[in-house]
Image (cartoon, rainbow, N blue to C red):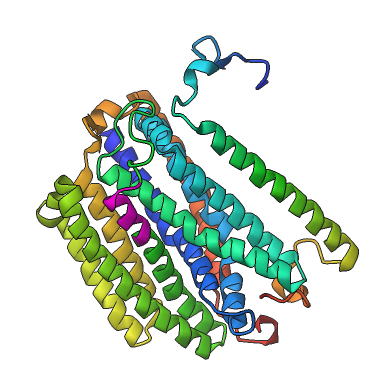
Amino acid sequence: MEVGRQPWIVYGVLRTADAVNPAPGLIWGAVLVGIVYTVLTAASVYVLRRMARDKPVPIAPQEQDVTGFTVV
Amino acid sequence: MAAAILLAVLWVGLSAYVLFAGADFGGGVWDLLAGGSERGRAQRAQIEHSIGPVWETNHVWLIFVLVVTWTGVPAVFAALCSTLYIPLTLAALGIIARGAAFAFRKASTALWQQRLFGFTFAFSSLATPFFLGTVAGAIASFRVPPGLAEGDLVTSWVNPTSLISGALAVGVAAYLAAVYLTRDAERGGHPELSERFRRRALAAGAVVGVLSGGGLAVLHADAPRLFTELTSGRGLPLLVVSIAAGIASMVLLWRRAYVAVRATAALAVVGLLWGWGAGQYPHLLPGVDLDQAAAADSVLVASLASLGAGALLLLPSLWWLYATFQREHAPDERDR
């Protein structure tokens, strides 16, 4: 749907190109978000794999269930 | 009339965000200042225990504020987001990094991982309210003109009023967190921890008091119109309430009345927020008042009606959530 309605942001009323924030430098925000999400994706995969391998934790663990996961 | 009501509802949402999510950010600030891994362990455990069940929920208020702003005063929303995209993007990244790191820290076992995620969580807890505070300062000092990205992208939020309100936002967050944590620690059966948070609450209260005074001095020079309204106009009664509640909070903390101080500390913060709101009303941006910026009446009425219906669902749920985690329970081994 998002792709189907392009180039309109409001169909038939406002084009996406006319709705974009005209401020300079927006690309850096996008780059930053890209980097953050790349790191988060890698960290998620790593943590999930570890959790699956090392220690079975209950679904929706309560704090008292998670012994051995000490808080720093 | 509908516009003024919606603006008031927006300010209620903002107050809730500051009181609840603000305290969660503050918890992260104390996590940052808790000391080394060994020394800070008990404090970090208490902070995690207190904010763990509620911090995600508390962010509904940010979404609420955003949605009400863009439906109620869309042109103002566009002006704010386009000119202030730098601090807003940084705040958004802070919120993302904070949530992710908080969850990852819970799930990681190695000390270095816990330290890395812990630091990310704690640092973004400090940075996020600062950037949100600079946004408030930009609005309060009328540095965001109407239109898309018409304001200066840097000086709109790097200026005296923004910097002091950024610092004030961090201070208020830390103060509220320390006040709430004294009671949580006491209820959990950790009197020594409660004592530690009490000292921090007293210190943070003093810092917030000084910052508020400094903020007024900055407003005098940098945003004279708001200063006049706050010190001799509509904002004055609310400012007086805030100051009185702030002083009462210090006395209550001193006397260890940890439940009562929650109410007065919240009142002090809310008084400051509403003093600002009342002092600035009805001017939203330079040259733009509420009646020019408000959406059509049909939109406002429909929004208010759906907010009312939504509140019927949301408020009891929130009440239940907080009541569940604030219930009295005897200290036992599981909490240690």
Identify the residue at image location x=51%, y=63%.
Answer: B24
Dominant SS of magenta comes to: helix
Q: Position of residue B168 (x, y in %)?
A: 34, 61
Identify the residue at image location x=42%, y=32%.
Answer: B82
* B88 lies above or below B193: above
Q: Position of residue B163 (x, y in %)?
A: 33, 54
Instruction: Using residue B159 as the reference point, say whether residue B282 is left or right of it.
Output: left
How many numbered discs, if any?
0
The C terminus of chain B sits in image quarter: bottom right
Q: Position of residue B178 (x, y in %)?
A: 44, 74
Can residue B320 be seen here? The reply is no
Identify the residue at image location x=30%, y=79%.
Answer: B250
* B47 lies above or below B117: below
Residue B122 lies in what quarter of the image? Answer: bottom right
Foreground pick, A24 / B78: A24
Can residue B266 be seen here? The reply is yes
Instruction: Using residue B2 as the reference point, say whether residue B85 is left or right of it.
Output: right
Of all residues, the one furthest to the right in this rendering is A53
| Magenta stretch contains residue B295 | no
| Magenta stretch contains residue B164 | yes
Of all residues, the one furthest to the left in this rendering is B232
Instruction: Write down the region rendered in magenta.
Output: B158-167
Identify the residue at image location x=28%, y=39%.
Answer: B143
Foreground pick, B213 / B334: B213
Foreground pick, A21 / A55: A21
Q: Position of residue B3 (x, y in %)?
A: 30, 34
The N terminus of chain B sits in image quarter: top left
* B292 lies above or below B92: above
Instruction: Using residue B280 as the reference point, say whether residue B200 is left or right of it.
Output: right
* B193 lies above or below B125: below
Of all residues, the one furthest to the top in this rendering is A12
Instruction: Using residue B99 as the reference point, say whether residue B334 is left or right of it.
Output: right
